[in-house]
Image (cartoon, grey):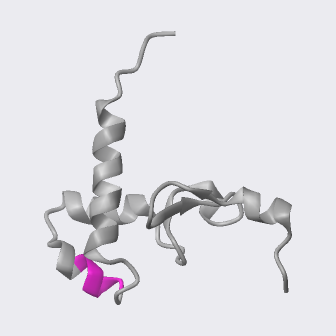
């Protein structure tokens, strides 16, 4: 099945490894080619789990490089100062 132009526009590339697609996981950020939520992996990072162990737990679907991208994007979002409305 060919994907039409309008369907391709739904997927937004956030980074090399991270995308959003309103048809997958309600548009939450996921790792490209998976249904693995970036938030789920970052919870594992926050719990102190080693990145290599996280990659093994996801059977290689999420690489340490992809985890680094998710972690870096989160850090950059947290640096953005929100102005009051």
In this rendering, is residue 8 above or below 59? above
Which residue sits at x=34%, y=22%? 81
* Residue 56 locus on image (x, y percent): 26, 87
Does residue 37 belong to the magenta stretch? no
Main SS of the magenta part reads helix
Does residue 56 belong to the magenta stretch? yes
Depth order, front residue of 2/84: 2
Q: What is the quadrant of residue 5 in the picture?
A: bottom right
Q: Would residue 71 be found to the left or right of residue 32 on screen?
A: left
* Residue 72 locus on image (x, y percent): 29, 51
Depth order, front residue of 65/56: 65
* Residue 76 locus on image (x, y percent): 32, 40
Residue found at the far bottom of this picture: 59
Tally of numbered tags: 0
Q: Would residue 19 be found to the left or right of residue 49 on screen?
A: right
In this rendering, is residue 48 above or below 82? below
Q: What is the quadrant of residue 44 in the picture?
A: bottom left
Depth order, front residue of 85/76: 76
* Residue 78 locus on image (x, y percent): 31, 35
In this rendering, is residue 29 above or below 65? above
Which residue sits at x=86%, y=70%? 4
Q: Quadrant of the N terminus?
A: bottom right
Which residue sits at x=34%, y=69%? 66
**Residue range (magenta):** 54-58
């Amino acid at each position: 099945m060919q994907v039409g132009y309008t369907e391709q526009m739904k997927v937004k590339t956030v980074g090399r490894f991270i995308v959003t697609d309103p048809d997958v996981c309600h548009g939450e950020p996921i790792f490209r080619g998976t249904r693995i939520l970036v938030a789920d992996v970052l919870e594992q990072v926050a719990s102190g789990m080693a990145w290599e162990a996280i990659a093994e737990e996801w059977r290689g679907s999420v690489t340490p490089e992809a985890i680094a991208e998710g972690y870096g994007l989160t850090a950059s979002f947290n640096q953005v100062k929100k102005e009051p409305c």
